[in-house]
Image: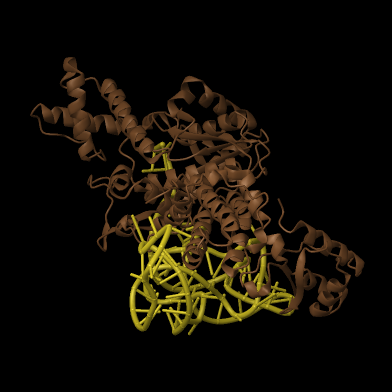
Chain colours: A brown, B yellow
Amino acid sequence: MKAHEPLFEALARAARQIGASALPEFRLETPRDPAHGDAATNLALLLAKGLGKPPRAVADQLVRALELPAGYVEKVEIAGPGFINFFLAEAQLARVLPAVLAAGEGYGRGDAGRGRPANVEFVSANPTGPLHVGHGRQAALGDAIASLLEWTGWRVTREFYYNDGGAQILSLARSVQARIQELRGRPAALPEGGYHGEYIRDIAERYVAAHPGDAEGADLEAVRRFAVQELRKEQDADLQAFGVKFDVYFLESSLYGSGKVEQTLRRLVAAGHTYEKDGALWLKTTDFGDDKDRVMRKRAEKGGEYTYFLPDVAYHVDKWERGFARAINVQGADHHSTVTRVRIGLQALEMSIPAGYPEYVLHQMVTVMKGGAEMKISKRAGSYMTVRELVEEVGRDAVRYFFLMRRGDSHLVFDVDLAKSQTEENPVFYVQMAHARMSGIFRVAAREPAAVRPEGVDLGVLVQPEEADLLKELAAFPAIVARAAETLEPHRVTGYLEGLARLAHAWYHKYRVLGEPEEAARLVLAAAVRQVLANALHLLGISAPDRM
RNA sequence: GCGCCCGUAGCUCAGGUGGAUAGAGCAGCAGCCUUCUAAGCUGUUGGUCGCAGGUUCGAAUCCUGCCGGGCGCACCA
């Protein structure tokens, strides 16, 4: 999969020949500035010190010692402080086209994961309300990260964890109960810190309709079950509208039923990192670098229950025991304090779970802008921008794209007006348009793009600079996917898409395909560009329309 | 107070784990339609990379200290 393999090896041989004792980890990269060629290496700069010669002299020696396969490189230059720049022969560039068409929907895939199982947990919203825009960002990120891992050879499980046990659920149940009683003409006595949203009233009404025998909502447990069930249904509908599918829905309550929580507790005690103080049971997390110890079981006066910490650890032990070589958790940055704690909990078990397990992708908050003003999100007040509203307003593709186009750890400003606009200013529209235009060529030609074959076509006629640019960009795609998967950063793919779309638009505008002497070769190029645009979009869960 | 993240063009953001003159989009300015979608294309203006030190051939990138913003520091999840 490594790019420019022949160059890489030739450089390594040349380095040995000029007397380099050890081969440093040198780079062979595509320079930003095309004047610096198609591939450049810093090898001479790295060798200079050890050889006691100026970098440019080393570069000169290297170039002399270089033995390259015939017809591979057009020109070699030494530039700047001692970079060696390679200009590939034109014929090399066009080689990407048969590769793209042969691989088709698989072009860009790799096998770094070698089929190992990975778990990606995301959204994991408590069933206490509708999904808000922050969950939307998480859904888009988590799903894209899962796809990136699949594309690089991991066997991925998408997982959703419900905290259906804790105090928040109780508060939810009491809030619904209060609204039920309000329906009976009694003043609503909402619990302290309860839920005020309009959706609570809706659930109360539905409860009464569904439970004629308990119109007072006296049965708190029945109210709780009903409310959780209703909200899960709502959340599932939102996720479905967003096109996200989970393989596993994991309920916190199941960890108690299966005895995993108890088992984890026993293991921690057995490993010797626990103690009792003030009637509570503590884990000595300071043994592992935490700034204070953490309570695992509250003292009796506080209810004597486990804190969320223990089931969290039990849950990740469960992931480990299910055989996941990697567990990746996508969460809002407001949860970052759990990162070290969960990891420490796993270390304290002393069962040889790697220190970096699980991995975390934390994302910052989302600000929604509309008409130049910020839309405030307040759960308490019940004024609430939900994922569903956003999807209904701007469409699923735009929502996904916008959530993915920024790095997770920068704040995201979601411009609703931009997301809806049908112009080049809107990146998702711009990219999809490029795909539609490529498709349009085949529609007019009455040909199937999938049926285009490069065999017997003289690709050597693709000599325009815009065509060379496109060929290089197409060749870069697999490395972009690999890098995005490595860093768990889907925004690299949206960035790539915008660049490829720009080149495609420029080429389309400047040259014609049909009826030109270069028609056959350009059809191959258009089919390949269309394929890669589609692959990148589909990888992100975004559609690639044939016309707009 | 402590911990994590962020600070790059007027705006929104990239910057491949230390490399060449710091990039892109938008906005601004100037242009381009007998054609497969002008729903687009071309050119151009714009920078103390928050500040100050340090590490080295070389720093937006690594280290230290400050300034500014966000988040978190529960026997809540």
Frontmost residue, A343 versus A10: A10
Residue that lies at the very extreme toward the top in this rendered image: A213
Q: Where is residue A30 in the image (x, y as percent from the top left)?
A: 66, 65
Instruction: Report which quarter residue A139 is drawn in.
Output: top left
Q: Can residue A202 be seen in this view?
A: yes
| A110 up-or-down from A457: above or below | above
| A32 up-or-down from A440: above or below | below
- Left or right of residue A83: residue A165: left
Q: Is residue A82 visible?
A: no
Frontmost residue, A176 versus A295: A176
Frontmost residue, A265 versus A446: A446
| A221 up-or-down from A280: above or below | above
Q: Where is residue A163 in the image (x, y as percent from the top left)?
A: 41, 33
Residue at 31%, 48% in the rendered image:
A390
Q: Position of residue A383 (x, y in %)?
A: 23, 47
Q: Where is residue A197 in the image (x, y as percent from the top left)?
A: 22, 40
